[in-house]
Amino acid sequence: MAILVTGGAGFIGSHMVLALLDAGHQVVVLDNLSTGFRWAVPASATLVVGDAGDQDLVRTVIRKYGIKAIVHFAGSIVVPESVADPLGYYNNNTVKSRALMEAAVAAGIRHFIFSSTAAVYGNPVENPVSEAASPAPVSPYGWSKLMTEIMLADTARAHDLRYVALRYFNVAGADPLGRSGQSTPRATHLIKVACEAALGRRAYVEVFGSDYPTPDGTCLRDYIHVSDLISAHVAALDHLKSGGASGVFNCGYSKGFSVLQVIEAVKRVSGVDFEVRQSPRRAGDPAAIIAGSQKVRDALGWQPQYDDLDEIVRHALSWEAHLARFKVAS
């Protein structure tokens, strides 16, 4: 099956490319390389450098390679950045997704998987939060993704298109075989930042806010290994191929760790006691958000394999060490 992966040169997208290739699919990656890397796309996949919002290019790619399904990762993901640049986020995440959907419908694509986010929930009233909770984003990033979910639902009602939107919680770790990982410079992901500090690539780690209504005053998050997240995507694709209905699913482990607990895990696994500094809260950060994940387990048969914070950290550390060697060698 020929599958188009937008943003397939990035952190999560590159792991999806590997999983699809491992399963024997033909994979075409569409990425403008603004945050992705050419080297992250295996030689057995086809890389098209371009924008997911370029309808002429998307139509050409679908026709040329006989694309039958689209997995859409391309987009901007930094919450504080979205607060500072809301129009940029609405353009990159919402406007361009609409253009991609229109091209997909015109080309007769029937299966569409969308990379959404737990940020659509904002500050949930209850944790773990289920898909039945009313969305209430507190950042333009969350709104940009929710708008895309709404467009997908409306499009699926009007056309022969079925979709799955996966709401990611905090994605971390790296491919257990060491083939890919989080490589973006100046990334804001806590586990990556802490791993960089443990390896001496950052002088310290900032904790943004220590006065939240949580047990230790720092934000609580549900951390999911990237490989488990990707297995949910593969299950979603199988679900759609077998005639399954469109749906929205949380992707997390239904357990939360505070910022300080994550930092301690990185110190424990690495054996390095790096500096930690307190900083003010960041705009758009909810106090706590933990996934209710029973729906994805029941409907898609998803069974996580790496539900362990120390293992997530070990894989992330291993990838950071690889990046350090790679950069020195290059």
Image: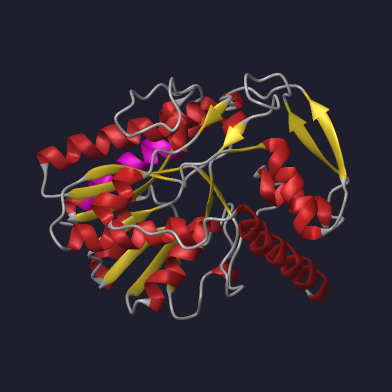
290 or 60: nearer the eye? 290
Report the side of 149 relative to 36 (left or right). Answer: left
Asked if residue 261 can be seen in this view, the reply is yes
Q: Can residue 47 be spotted in the picture?
A: no
* Residue at x 49%, y 42% (from the top left corner): 169
- Name above or below for residue 88 compared with residue 167: above
Q: Position of residue 311 (x, y in %)?
A: 62, 61
**Is 9 left, or right, of 300 in this rendering?**
right
Where residue 139 appears, as percent x and y from the top left, is: 51, 24
What residue appears at the point 40 percent right and 35 percent down from the top-left corner?
145
Magenta-drawn segment: 93-104
Quarter of the rendering containing residue 150: top left
Residue drawn 57% across the image and 32% down it: 79
The N terminus appears in which quarter of the rendering? bottom left
In the rendered image, the quadrant that contains the C terminus is: bottom right
Query: Residue 245 lies in magenta, yes or no?
Result: no
